[in-house]
Image (tube, grey):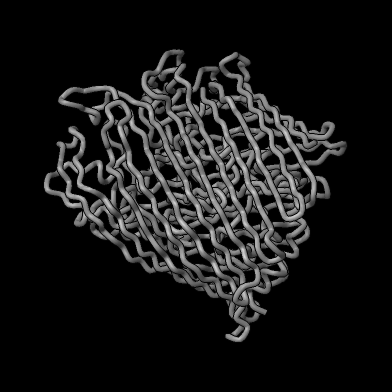
Amino acid sequence: MNTLKLNKHALTATSAVMLAASAWAQQDLGAAYELDPYTVTTATRVEKQISSIPQSVSIVSEQSLQDQLSISSDLISALSQMAPSYSPSRGKMTGAGETFRGRNPLFMIDGVPQSNPLRDGSRDGYTIDPAMIERIELVHGASAAQGMGATGGIINYVTKRAPAVDGLNQWAEFGLSSSDQFSSDGVGYRSAYGLGYRQGDLGLVGGVTYEWRPMSYDGDGNLVGIDNVQGDTMNSSALDLYGKLTYQLDEDQELRFMVNTFEMKQDLEYVQVAGDREAGVPTTSIEGETIGKATQNDVTTLSASYRHNAIGGGKLSVDLFANDFAATYGGGTYGTFIYEGELIFDQSENQSEKKGAKVTFVRDLDEYLNLGLVTGIDFFEDTTQQVLVQTNRQWVPETTYESWAPYLQLDRLVGDFVVTTGVRFENAKLDVGDFTTLESYGSQEVAGGSPDFDEWLFNLGTTYRATDALTVFASYTQGFGMADVGRVLRGINEPGQDVDDFLDLEPVVTDNYELGARWSSENWKASLSGYWSTSDLGSRLQANEDGIYLVRREKTEIWGAEAELERDLDARSSIGGVFAWVDGKSDTDGDGEVDTRLNGANIPPARLNLYWNRVWGEGLRTRFQASNYFDSDSRGFSGYTLFDLLLSYELGEGALKVGLENVFDKQYITYYSQTVGNDSRYFAGRGRTLTAKYSFEF
């Protein structure tokens, strides 16, 4: 029996789970990582059991996500808690300095890319409200399965689906949050409404959410510093509109359409008071008006899909997508923004329009050595620019990336081994017209060009079922990305440059090696993996005097380990923990040897998460968790430990959840601020914060 046939049996085993997910009411104990019997699509392009994938892959269930969001309403903070190899969240709208296994992740919504590698403004974590998410699929480490951008891994937000049976389901959610100061500027609220409808072959699901996020207080009772330039989630509002339609043409064919529009906008009511990094004084905020256009994210994602489950002896899927992304940043009178010889106020906005198509065909080749085949082709176009909104200037010229990429993957079952091998041919072209840099770079006239890249990307791996409980895996995978073309182009400060000959536009190809094991028995779940990631022409961020990050193209090597353990103590309680450690070096002198340890903008701290889940009966359950971030002398980081508590109580037709973040009101400086922050970005973390949410179905 080949691996694709194994996957069919896996789908049968998981049907009950997936139906429960579509009803939006899973009742597990809330563990972040679910091994078997879940299936994923992001790592393999087809539904496949995690146990047969030779790479670290995990799924965050809807209840696990909602539990974390009941402690902290910030999606990236929740993600960081559940994926420990992801950097600690900065708690800001910007994700600069947040990495996954030390490299950039590819954010997706239902397989539609949200990341903007041509001008990485680090805003791709906030493009959808979590109320619209059914589960999150995580691929740890480099992957070329979804194209450009996943040098560190894939984070795919899978959206809600229509009910499995005929009828109408509706749900609503109301929530409040407050610091323990209980002052008006520290109180936030959110509301959400959604419905799901099925009638025969037609299925609909939709929702709307609105959230107001207040100011935060640190453990010492002071306002946390606001980031008026890169963007902040404090003092901001967010509106999300979501809809999905499915139509079953016949028993083998289905059409799907999805749209999501999301806007997060920061109000201009607070200004920053810079701290003193040397003296250990954190940045704070005071009331005051900020000039210019409000910092914001404005994102629309569209997709249309066709599925045929019986064509050519296999299954065919065709996915079309589009994404319109605009991210506005705060301004200032930086030296970079000199205009007509004068230092002026200005601010920038990243604009990106992406569209593409993905074709996938799956078939069992029983007549050829019992092989399982996955093949297809991807088409992708990304047009990006960065403009200065006050003076209508181009900071980054309009740049278009076009690619087509055929791929082939084969699976074969050999005894207790599942062998997987694949190849992807990435044929890419970058179009940049002639442009002139800003005055601060010398108003250099740069000749445009159309450099192209042909890259063969490979993966090879195997899983071995040692016992019914133990699976061992090993893999080699490659990821493909661009090293923030926009930063490179806008920073040209020498005359006579030609885009076609500019070496820094060469792509980043990451080689990832991983060895691991998974254990799953009646009362135990465990996983352990070690990995090594290398790139001959990598990408490292380094800030200039204005705090604006520049790209350094250097050989980089990153290595690390992850471990997870969960134990069911009885039918009502479980304990567990997750450990992650990442480190890395780069070649700063160009001698071919990595010699300098990567800083906190690239490498997250080692951390240990511990938790205890308990169902007490009568609809009451709790979760108590601790997150410890270990010291790092080489990066100038003093670690800290935070404790959180969640209480969930079934009340009427719904559930009341009360979360307490930072239970002991720990005063601490965030990892980013300690390692690479400056006086204006020396931010303290949030102190004790209370969140209460009531959600119900009707």
Q: From the image, which quarter does the N terminus lie in?
A: bottom right
Coordinates of residue 145 in the picture (x, y in percent): 49, 62
Determine whether, in the image, residue 578 is placed left or right of residue 545: right
Quarter occupied by residue 503: bottom left
**Residue 32 in sight:** no
**Residue 129 in sight:** yes
Determine whether, in the image, residue 245 is placed left or right of residue 406: right
Q: Residue at x 42, y 22 (%)?
A: 283
Does residue 437 sit above or below 409 in this rendering?
above
Coordinates of residue 419 in the picture (x, y in percent): 56, 75
Determine whether, in the image, residue 686 is placed left or right of residue 525: left
Q: Residue furthest left?
A: 496
Coordinates of residue 640 in the picture (x, y in percent): 53, 34
Out of 87 and 266, give the one closest to the viewer: 266
Q: How many marks?
A: 0
Q: Residue furthest front?
A: 249
Determine whether, in the image, residue 438 is placed left or right of residue 132: left
Q: Residue at x 31, y 24 (%)?
A: 332
Q: From the image, which quarter does the C terminus lie in?
A: top right
Quarter occupied by residue 337: top left
Q: Residue at x 76, y 52 (%)?
A: 164
Coordinates of residue 432 in the picture (x, y in percent): 26, 50
Does residue 30 sit above or below 358 in this rendering?
above
Does residue 194 sit above or below 488 in this rendering?
above
Out of 598 and 420, give the one closest to the viewer: 420
Quarter occupied by residue 119: top left
